[in-house]
């Protein structure tokens, strides 16, 4: 029987905890047929490395070398997690979207676009006609058609991991400009507007509710 759980805990957590929890949610999707939606934040600036990045060839800029590092389940380039809201969605293999996993990018990003619009912040999907840039160290300096932009700046990007037919997708919404990556402006800096995170996550949940029939509010995951 499929269950759906919402984890909406905006208390910042460590990078290790955040990545461990996302992996656990993917395991729950595989073993328990659980659908999960999670919103979370980071307690300190943290660099996450994409699953397929070569550790021998990993040479971060000097300003990033001393930051905590974690490994992501998903691919892509390195991400500096700092002043952001992160989401993750886990779907079992039996879910309809699991038959066409790339559809989940559009579903999640469209929800973010609509939720931000309710706070009078206009953003848009990059689309097919803009060239990719895949030679940059930080993922937010790269381009993908599913990216969400404010003007010319990428403010939301997502990546997936698929295992035994199940999907784990997580993505970062850059709220503020990090001192460690001033070349990546945050949405609040670009728009000169303060984002109400409680309202945003509430609206996002409403937009993403159709992923399941019924939902349960879940407590933060505890690991021994």
Image (cartoon, rainbow, N blue to C red):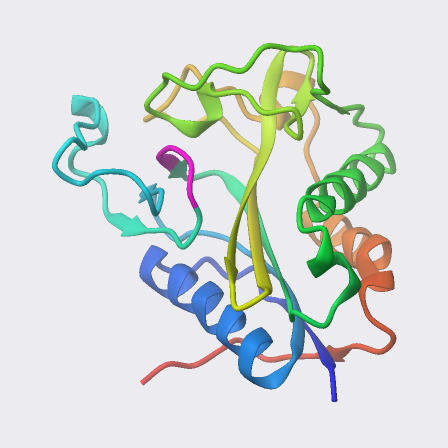
Residue at horizontal 46 percent and vertical 57 percent from the top = 12
Q: Which span of residues is magenta-colored?
A: 75-79
Q: Residue furthest left?
A: 56
Whether residue 168 is situated above or below residue 175 in the rendered picture? below
Q: Taking 90 as reference, is 125 left or right?
A: right
Number of marks drawn: 0
**Where does the image place residue 19, in percent across and percent down from the top left?**
40, 60
**Where does the image place residue 139, in percent across and percent down from the top left?**
43, 28
- State the residue in front, 102 or 175: 102
Residue at horizontal 53 percent and vertical 30 percent from the top = 176
The N terminus, quarter of image: bottom right
Residue at horizontal 31 percent and vertical 51 percent from the top = 71
Q: Magenta part mainly helix, strand or loop? A: loop
Q: Taking 12 as reference, is 135 left or right?
A: left
77 falls in the magenta region: yes
Q: Taking 181 as reference, is 220 left or right?
A: right
**Looking at the rendering, which quadrant does residue 224 occupy?**
bottom left
Q: Taking 126 as reference, is 47 left or right?
A: left
139 falls in the magenta region: no
**Where does the image place residue 173, in percent across and percent down from the top left?**
59, 38
Q: Residue furthest bottom?
A: 1
Whether residue 185 is situated above or below residue 46 in the rendered picture? above
- State the residue in front, 105 or 163: 163
**Where does the image place residue 206, in percent across and percent down from the top left?**
85, 58
């Amino acid at each position: 029987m499929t269950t759906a759980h919402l984890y909406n805990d905006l208390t910042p957590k460590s990078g290790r905890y955040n990545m461990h929890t996302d992996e656990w949610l993917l395991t729950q999707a595989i073993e328990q047929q659980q659908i999960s939606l999670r919103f979370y934040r980071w307690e300190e600036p943290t660099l996450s490395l994409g699953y397929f990045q070569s550790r021998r060839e990993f040479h971060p800029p000097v300003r990033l070398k001393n930051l905590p590092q974690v490994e992501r389940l998903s691919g892509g380039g390195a991400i500096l997690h700092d002043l952001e809201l992160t989401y993750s969605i886990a779907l079992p293999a039996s879910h309809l979207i699991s038959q066409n996993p790339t559809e989940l990018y559009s579903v999640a990003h469209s929800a973010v676009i609509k939720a931000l619009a309710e706070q009078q912040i206009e953003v848009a999907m990059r689309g097919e006609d803009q060239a990719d840039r895949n030679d940059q160290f930080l993922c937010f300096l790269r381009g993908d058609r599913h990216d969400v932009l404010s003007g010319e700046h990428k403010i939301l990007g997502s990546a997936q991991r698929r295992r035994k037919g199940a999907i784990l997708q997580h993505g970062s919404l850059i709220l503020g400009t990090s001192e460690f990556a001033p070349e990546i402006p945050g949405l609040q800096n670009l728009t000169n507007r303060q984002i109400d995170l409680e309202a945003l996550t509430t609206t996002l949940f409403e937009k993403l509710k159709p992923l399941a029939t019924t939902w349960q509010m879940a407590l933060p995951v505890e690991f021994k």
